[in-house]
Image (spheres, coloured by chain):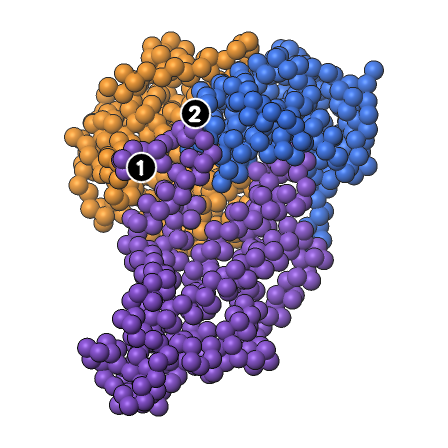
Chain colours: A purple, B blue, C orange
Amino acid sequence: MTQSLSHWLLDEAPGSRRQAVLGSLYRGLLAILSNPPGLAGLVIVTVLVLIAIFAPLLDRGISPIAQDLGNRLAQPSAAHWFGTDELGRDIYSRTLYGSRVTLTIVALVSVLVAPIGLAVGTLAGYLGGWVDIVLMRITDVFLAFPRLVLALAFAAALGPGIENAVIAISLTAWPPYARIARAETITIARSDFIQAVVLQGASTWRILLRHIVPLCLSSVIVRLTLDMAGIILTAAGLGFLGLGAQPPTAEWGAMVSAGRDVILDQWWVSTIPGVAIFLVSLGFNLLGDGLRDVFDPKETS
Amino acid sequence: MAGMIDVQDLRVSFHADGRSVHAVRGVSFSVAEGESFGIVGESGSGKSTVLKAIAGLVASESSTLAVHGRPIAQRRTKADRRQLQFVFQDPYASLHPRQTADQILREPLIIHGLDRHDARIAAALDEVGLKPEHRFRYPHQLSGGQRQRVAIARALILRPPILLLDEPTSALDVSVQAEILNLIARLKQANRLTIILVSHDLGVVAHLCNRIAIMQAGKLVEVLTAEELRNGGAREAYTRELVEASRGFTRAVAAL
Amino acid sequence: MTAPLLSVENLSVSYPGRSGVTKALREASFTLGHERLGVVGESGSGKSTMGRALLGLIPKPGVVTASRMDFDGQSLLGASDADWQKLRGRRLSMIMQDPKYSLNPVRRIGDQIVETCLLHLDISRREAERRALDMLEAVKIRQPDAVFQQYPHQLSGGMGQRAMIAMMLVAEPDLLIADEPTSALDVTVQNEVLRILDDLVRNRGMGLIFISHNLNIVSSFCDRVLIMYGGRILEQISARDLGAARHPYTRALLAAAPSLDAPRATLATVTRDPAWLE
């Protein structure tokens, strides 16, 4: 069964468009699987997603926000695998639920940043002229500020909270995407296959949406995956400074921050969420590198 | 009598870094319906630019272009586009890398709002000698010759009366070139196409075309029939030099 | 007859891959004297691979085997990297298709040629500069002094290819391998470059292996021709007798090329026979 499915997917003469698309996705998957660091990244990210989905099943019945002031800053033990924090909350459970916050932020930022960057970049690159000048100068203004400082300013102005943190991060994260998309668009727009659709009478919108954007997408996805680590760290930084998720929501950055005062005596309070941030950042970075290898046309030609 | 294509005083210049390069400096010719017209020249002669200006890919100055005696404006309408279709030199660069042959052929049908997509695509593939199994392949799963066939099918699926070919075989091996040239000759017969073919290879141009224009430095040197070219009927020294050079290596410099 | 400059027996190149071993070159055997040997084939025929193998330039993980590969009495089999470095540039040289990729873009033409001289010949810098200028003149560059001071991007394709030839020939190698040396050039320039190569081969007694996809050029320029297909040498024939070639592939290639002088209604296409690779 699996044998015949794999055959069907790898068929050099697919019988339908669906088979062709699935086949090329399957080849991409095989390429990622044969790339050890990329595979490691994929495993880490998959585990993160599974943890976030199944957190209620994995939390051993301990609520992440249940306080037990009598059992503050307890060492890791059989009852509390990762110990407890300054309010006696179970760190294991909080770390599990923290993955949901992190994933939400990551997902929302991606959904906001990629389209903004793609739209600005492809329009500027394809239309050129004054559209390009105006859009790219706006991009430059955003790029001129250090990202974390700008995010802090936005978050402070918008007020604390996850949604505002997402908006603040997105507002500071899109310019590099616009730059990438513009550079790619300029190269792609000159190529013969775009000239060919121009000659067929395709409208500018059609060319942008159906022919240029799909080609910019892969490098944007790669960049996004590589940026995830930075986004998670920025979110954690905002949380650390009290501008991200608000108590009692479990958020890794805020958890690290809370453990700061006791880091020498009760190391686990800061370390456990810190390790989680580290692992997830690493996972996204490895996955991004793997994806880049898969998408790289030099490798596939 | 107006020809299928009339080009009058075509001029194209490119501007970059404050300098302008006059790529085409006043070229005029006309091509009759059903005729195959060849343009030969070396790199930088402006031969490809002439073709791209006719197709509307580069802007021309102070020229008049008429198809079927009807002038065509610089800004092309969809109907204009359907008159003139183009085949590019490099089949590796002229097909969208993330689209299957099916999608590539479907695109012009959608743009021009034609019906019966599947039947038309199947017919177009068959016409250029591709099998149904090639239909859902991506360009990287096709050989160079097969890609060029897809590119030709794409150009012909709108049933244009005129086909513009820019070095259609120079990126291909000799044996594949023969197949593609035979295909073009057959399609031209079957569809009563008017063809303008640009190439650096005199053999290719003389094989397909009745009349041949020699270009040098943006100008037409002369226009000859294939017969004249073959039988030493060239009037200009440059043409004779080109013919001599294309016959292969000669030890002594031919006495000019 | 004197001993051949190069004699090769059963030269094979293969690349191990995920889906088995790819044989890029299969048991090629030939000898080369002080002559112009043409190697003709289509893409994938192994002609460039053969050129690279003769220079020890097959990249890992490619595997090169041969039962004999002698250059001027010296076996190239099992030559170390140091041996190759001594040979390459000095006694064996290669010209590539596109000078853009072979010349260093940020160094002056003259400096690059002088450096090649100093690397391989035991001469003073002044002598090297003199030879570099002579060489530029020998490849018919009109203003050698000016070109000496120029960077590669300032030269046209033909000039760049000449500079490249000058650089490769300044150390007076005994064997030159030219891989599509004129394919990127216009026909008129092409013939000038060929004439330069022709002079150099005849005057300096060099051996030349001329790799090309163009049968027309090879047959008019070379003394002898190897026809390659699928990594195998199908036929060795003197260029003069090419019209009487026996192998169906050679005959098909000749008939497939459109010619100005011999018009045909339809061009012959090549029917490939798997038995050719047996």
Subunit of mark 1?
A
Please rate how many residues cluster around mark 2, counting C-alpha atoms within 10 Å: few if below 14, some from 14 to 19, many from 20.
few
Q: Residue at x 69, y 28 (%)?
A: B82
Q: Position of residue A147 (x, y in %)?
A: 52, 73
Checking the image for residue B133, the label placed there is 2
The quadrant holding residue C84 is top left
Q: Position of residue A257 (x, y in %)?
A: 39, 83
Instruction: Give the SS element for disc 1.
Output: helix
Q: Is residue C127 visible?
A: no
The percent position of residue C27, horizontal first and vertical second, equals 22, 26
In the image, residue A128 sits, relative to residue C157, either above or below, namely: below
Picture coordinates of residue A111 (x, y %)? 52, 60
Q: Identify the residue at horizontal 35%, vertical 27% (top origin).
A: C45
Type of the residue with mark 1: Ser
What residue lies at 41% left-to-right and 75% top-to-bottom?
A251
Label 2 resides on the chain identified as B
